[in-house]
Image (cartoon, rainbow, N blue to C red):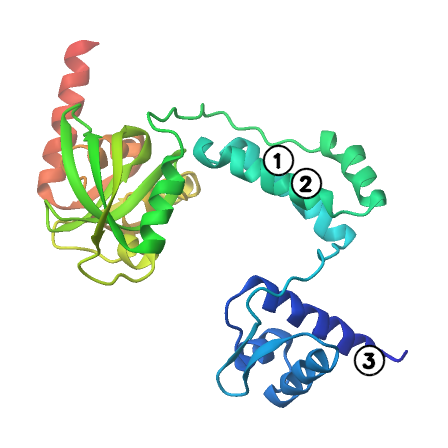
Amino acid sequence: MNDHYLKKLDRVTAILTQLQSKLIVRAQDLAAKFDVSVRTIYRDVKTLENAGIPIVGEAGSGYSLMDGYKLPPVMFTKEEVLSFITAEKLMQKFLHQSLGNHYQTAMEKVRSVLKYSDRNLIQNIEKQIDVFNYHPKTEDNIRNIIPIILESIAEKKQITLEYTTVDSKISMRTIEVVGVFFEFNYWYIMAFCTLRNDFRQFRVDRILQIIKTENPFLQEYGQINDYRQNPNGNKTKVRLLVDKKIIGHLSNSKKYYGLIEEIEREDGVELIFETDWIKDGFPRWLITFADYAEVLEPESLKDSIKKIVADISRKI
């Protein structure tokens, strides 16, 4: 079998995998993925149809497998098996506890379709990989909380929350969830809050009660990163001039606190932020490297830093 037919076999097999994993697959997307022409994809789909695979759809719209059609389990390459092992180690340390059992049963199903030799490979190498996480996992008040949240996103149904605020007050909220994300060892919800009539973040471990209602979303939402990156009217602009020698130590935290621009200057690096936490969180973060930074604006941030320093001086 020459190289041309081997490439086609690999591509046709990969297209079949795409059909198994997605509701609709467009020829244009497949052509871009495999770096071939759309006409080549049409021929590949025809090859699958000739092999007896019931494909629904046509050129120009999209393809899918006939509803109810089942294929035997796919086989994995050795490299894919090794990636599963590594991913499983990561998930054991960072996966939210409400998803843990579901992930474990999913991995058991994956292991069940592995060849015998690949099972031996897992047994021989899984104890040689570990991930060290120095942050304790947070405990939830509600079982299966992340699946409930994800269901609300999929079904576009509002959620009501009983929530503990940062100052330990109990608040009732009705929200429309845009998405969930993991950051600085906590899981968060990004959602539109009907009480505040604005977008808010909610830390999952602070939720005391959650109810998925039958009330539909009042509006459509985009991707979660659209709302995390775009500034809103409550943000304050901050400009800092920071010593170049400590910039590397701020690589993760500066984005968390709203970095929007970074300018290289002769006397340092100018960092420009748009932050929601100008009154408390931002100045307390800045105090950790304040001897290497100059506040260019706003003046109120300088006053906050002076007050924190004065409070510390009185206590020591």
Residue for badge 3: 5
Whether residues under marks 2 and 3 lie with C-beta atoms below 8 angstroms apart, the answer is no
Whether residues under marks 2 and 1 lie with C-beta atoms below 8 angstroms apart, the answer is yes
- Going by the numbered disc 3, the residue's amino acid type is Tyr
Q: In the image, residue 277 lies at what x, y percent? A: 19, 39
Residue for badge 1: 89
Q: In the image, residue 205 lies at what x, y percent? A: 32, 29
Q: Nearer the viewer, residue 130 or 139?
A: 139
Q: Which residue is rendered at x = 42% and y = 38% of the image?
A: 249
Which mark identifies residue 199?
none
Q: Residue furthest top?
A: 316
Q: Name the secondary structure under disc 1.
A: helix
Local packing at callout 3 (Cα closer than 10 Å; few below 14, some 14-19, many 20+) is: few
Q: Nearer the viewer, residue 205 or 248?
A: 205
Q: Name the secondary structure under disc 2.
A: helix
User: In this image, 31 relative to 252: left or right?
Assistant: right
Which mark identifies residue 85?
2
Relative to 212, residue 288 above or below: above
